[in-house]
Amino acid sequence: MMSDHDRNDSAVMPSDIHGQVSVFDRFAGRVSGWVSRAWFFSLCVAIVVIWAPSIVLLPLDTWQLIINTITTIITFLMVALLQNTQKRSDDAVQQKLNAIADSLADLMATIPELEQDRRELLQAVGLEDRESTA
């Protein structure tokens, strides 16, 4: 078995996760679920189709200002929400990879010829934390 000093301290393992999700994370997850569905895309298309003929009813400047403002605000908010869910998804995948690598290292410890490979694997666990900009 791998001792605590062998495991890279920067690697987060699934057993280290507390499971509590913040209100914002739950909100971002729900919004991400909604906007990734076909009905949301259809709604966006319908809004554009309904809005497009308004060019004949409104002065050109007003017409462009309305759609530009609405789409900019929605895009700004969606980027923040979707980035939140993407980061949490990436973190979950990394934790699973850490667990797989940890298990593989334990298995490799039973074969003396693989000791160097085992040490390299253990050094690689958590490497994303040391090489990232976060």
Image (cartoon, rainbow, N blue to C red):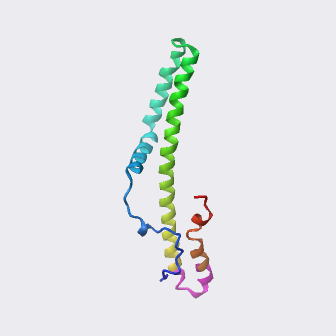
Say left or right for 89 vs 128: left
Q: Is residue 106 above or below residue 23?
A: below
Q: Is residue 47 magenta?
A: no
Examine the rendered structure and indicate whether residue 27 appears above or below residue 109: above
Say which quadrant the C terminus sits in.
bottom right
Q: Is residue 33 above or below residue 61?
A: below
Q: Residue drawn 59% across and 79% down?
A: 119
Q: Is residue 60 left or right of residue 45?
A: right
Residue occupying image coordinates x 46% and y 26%: 46
What residue is drawn where x is 47% and y is 55%? 88
Residue 13 picture location, percent across and down: 46, 69
The rendered magenta stretch, by its main secondary structure, is classed as helix
Query: In this figure, what is the number of numbered marks?
Result: 0
Residue at image position (49%, 40%) is 78
Does residue 109 belong to the magenta stretch? yes
Q: 6 and 34: which one is in front?
A: 6
Image location of residue 89, percent across then percent down: 48, 55
**Residue 43, image x, y percentages:** 44, 30
Residue furthest out toward the bottom = 112
Give percent across and percent down for residue 18: 38, 64
Which residues lie in the magenta part?
A: 107-118
Seen in the picture, residue 35 relative to 115 is either above or below; the reply is above
- Residue 31 picture quarter: top left
